[in-house]
Amino acid sequence: MNHFHHNRRALVSALALASSAVVVPTLWAQARLEKSKISLAVEGKSSFHHLPLTIAEQRGFFGAEGLEVDISDLTGDSPAALSTASASFDVVSGAYEQTISLQSRGRQFQAFVLQGRAAQIAMGISPKALPAYQSVLDLKGKKIGVSALGSSSDMVASMILARAGLTPQDVSFIGVGTGGGAVNAFRAGHIDALSNVDPVMTMLEQKGEIRIIADTRTLKGSVDVFGGPVPAGCLYASAEFIQRNPNTVQALTYAIIRALKWLQTAGPGDIIKTVPPAYLMGDRALYLSAFNKVRGAISPDGLMADEGPRISVMALASFDSSIKLDKIDLSKTYTNAFARKAKARFQA
């Protein structure tokens, strides 16, 4: 019965397309999707890391490609949680370096469209907890909040400590999430410093509650901390899923790159109208000023820069001893094939 309805629906939409094709002669020829219903896991969806995903969802870009994407938000991007998620979901919207961690555990995952080209994480200290703060060395023995243990914010904090000669063992890392929980933990004094994403960091910064000591929300800041552009949020899936569903993966990439292109020219009003109200954390102006900070870090075309993966794996290996550089095949952790095709289609 369902099958018949589905075919009938397909026929009706095909007829609708045929009639609209008269008006829109440039209708993109769509390859048949191997799978049109996609389950997607995302870590901390309201953060700017996943803004392109949210735009694609809210503006109907997935639907326009014939996709139905069911998005589950798993807050606190602990690698363990994502490792399980990667097995039970078709696709993950997460930090690129997770594909490296998964490979080091013998699992092949590939990023196929980039959302961010800088880590988009800032680290700051509490002037209340550390009134005499002078340098990173003052963090020895202190509590540092991160979105989750082993997450990108943990990696950025570890790198900042390493540059000052401290190890992760010199501090206590505490997972506080990426939203209100992080703000509350910081305000309540449960942590002395915080490494996190926007809009959380901008909110604390604007109220004068935090003093930023390192910032990878801009391309320049990312180069300061990592020595180059670091791939951040991306969509990734198992190598097997990508091989089996190339048209579906291409359709997902089209939707994200259309969102990236939209974000290039979107004005403040467009953003506010598109993003779910809860993401604004009760302060539109603040959300927009955070957006303006990370705007340059959003990928313009979904393509992974050549040196990005190399910088990423070096960063990861610098604080995760389970990552053996000679054992990782970076060429298997990402592909630009889908993004190149989408870039050509949308002139992104």
Image (cartoon, rainbow, N blue to C red):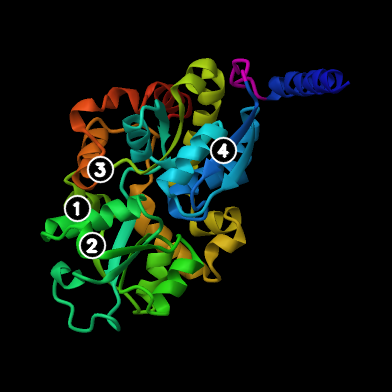
235 w.r.t. 146: above or below: above
Comparing labels 3 and 4, the label whose residue is closer to the camera: 3
> Which numbered disc, 2 or 4, marks the residue closer to the eye?
4
**Depth order, front residue of 192/196:** 192
**Label 1's element?**
helix
- Could you say whether the residue bearing mark 2 is in a helix, strand or loop? strand
User: Over which residues does the magenta segment extend?
Assistant: 24-34
Give the answer, above or below, for where 56 lies relative to 24.
below
Q: Distance of mark 4 from mark 1, alpha carbons? A: 31 Å
Pointers 1 and 3 in contact (CB under 8 A)?
no
Q: Earlier in the sequence, mark 1 or mark 3?
A: 1
Q: Is residue 270 visible?
A: yes
Residue position marked by numbered label 4 in the rendering: 40
* Residue nearest the observer in this picture, 115 or 273: 115
Q: Which mark is residue 225?
A: 1
Q: Is residue 336 left or right of residue 74?
A: left
Tag 2 and tag 1, C-beta contact below 8 Å: yes
Nearer the N terminus, badge 2 or badge 4?
A: 4
- The image position of residue 190, as x and y in percent, is 38, 75
How many C-alpha atoms fall within 10 Å of the one at disc 3: few (<14), some, or many (≥20)? many
Q: Is residue 28 magenta?
A: yes
Quadrant of image for the C terminus = top left
In the rendered image, residue 17 lying in the magenta stretch gets the answer no
Q: Indicate the position of residue 93 as horizontal and vertical percent values.
A: 48, 40
Q: How many marks?
A: 4
Marks 2 and 3 in Cβ contact (< 8 Å): no
* Cα separation between marks 2 and 3: 18 Å
* Residue in the picture at 52% in, 67% down: 284
Quadrant location, the N terminus: top right
